[in-house]
Amino acid sequence: MSAVVDPSTLPPREPQPPAGYDALLLVSFGGPEGQDDVLPFLRNVTRGRGIPDERLEEVAHHYRAFGGVSPINAQNRALKAALEGELAARGIDLPVLWGNRNWDPYLADALREAHAAGHKRLLALVTSAYSSYSGCRQYREDLAGALADTGLTGEIAIDKVRQYFDHPGFVAPFAEGVRGALERLREQGLDPARDVQVLFATHSIPTSTAVTSGPPGAALGPDGAYGAQHRAVASVIMEGLNGEFGAVAWDLVFQSRSGAPHIPWLEPDVNEAIEAVAADGARGVVIVPLGFVSDHMEVLWDLDEEAMTTAREARLVAVRVPTPGVHPEYVAGLVDLVSERLAGPDGAALCGTRPALTPLGPWYDVCRAGCCPNPRVAKPALSGLDA
């Protein structure tokens, strides 16, 4: 379960003062929207790694099973609309732009749109809650690259909201989902404290990049800030449910591994963990996609298809918990994060509160020097002390 970490080894937090942003930039991964898009999209994702198309087709069949359409773009459209509604309800006059790293609408197009509208200072809201190279710094690198590619470096400034893994708005939908899943299993005659295991699933990453996630020198355990943040959030969720269900067993597991088989990645795999749970005598399992903000392809395929099949074959009663999506508390929490950095109607009131549910947070407004380094080559990155 939880690993011992020492939050006191983290560098001091230095919250940034409120700032006058003139647009919000929603930044996401992107996904194909038709069969003809699948391979070009996967080539974008793996650009520079020399992966042949025949290997990409091994992943492409996940998308092709859904008509070549990833749900992520539709989910981002829904999130953009929900953010616009929440901002308007609070009287915050801040337009929301949207750009993806790997598919249309691309970041470069969003920056051109911002420039054409006269926006000079953007606040980026990334659809990734945790610290890692792929979950934070790579987004910052791509933002810097998009500015360079469009010739807008110096014309537009971009900051980024803090990692929000333990913000109440992100945690609440998962806690609600785990509670609902345990209630369902109890209604089916299972005792959660005796018969059920909760598996918190997140994307596996190479152990070498996990170790270097977070600020250098922080004693955050064997898989760095990435593992420590996930375990801290899972602990908070389960501790909050002890009074209702007793001490329910839980663990952090990993999914969606890719890359060369000789390179170590974080384990255990969710499917192996499900089989181990069944072998230990459990009758039910709750699968929580804790590392994801929406039900995109890696949730629909790797969990709803593969993991749920593994659970059925192991004769386990399984429930998969929803991701935050456009849950009202999640959307409100994201706008709270924006408001922390605003000089707008409620920015001054929220700055200084910076809610966080674990001892690891609140995380940094500006990433520390050397945080989550690029495993291949150093690239410019925005919103960091070493940018």
Image: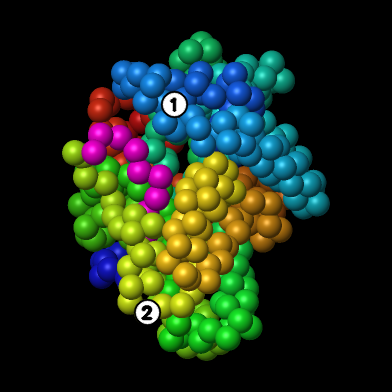
Q: Main secondary structure of the magenta part?
A: loop
**Kind of residue at badge 2:** Gly
- Per the rendering, the mark at residue 203 is none
The quadrant of the picture occupied by the N terminus is bottom left
Nearest the viewer among 246 and 300 is 300
Q: Which residue: 59% across, 72% down? A: 181
* Position of 285 relative to 204 (above/below): below
> Coloring scheme of the render?
rainbow
Q: Position of residue 75 (x, y in %)?
A: 66, 42
| Residue occupied by mark 1 | 57
Please say whether residue 237 is visible from this viewpoint: no
Q: Any magenta on residue 254?
A: yes
How many numbered dots are placed on residues in this image?
2
Nearest the viewer among 31 and 281 is 281
Q: Secondary structure at mark 1?
A: helix
Q: Any magenta on residue 382?
A: no
| Residue occupied by mark 2 | 281
Q: Secondary structure at mark 2?
A: loop
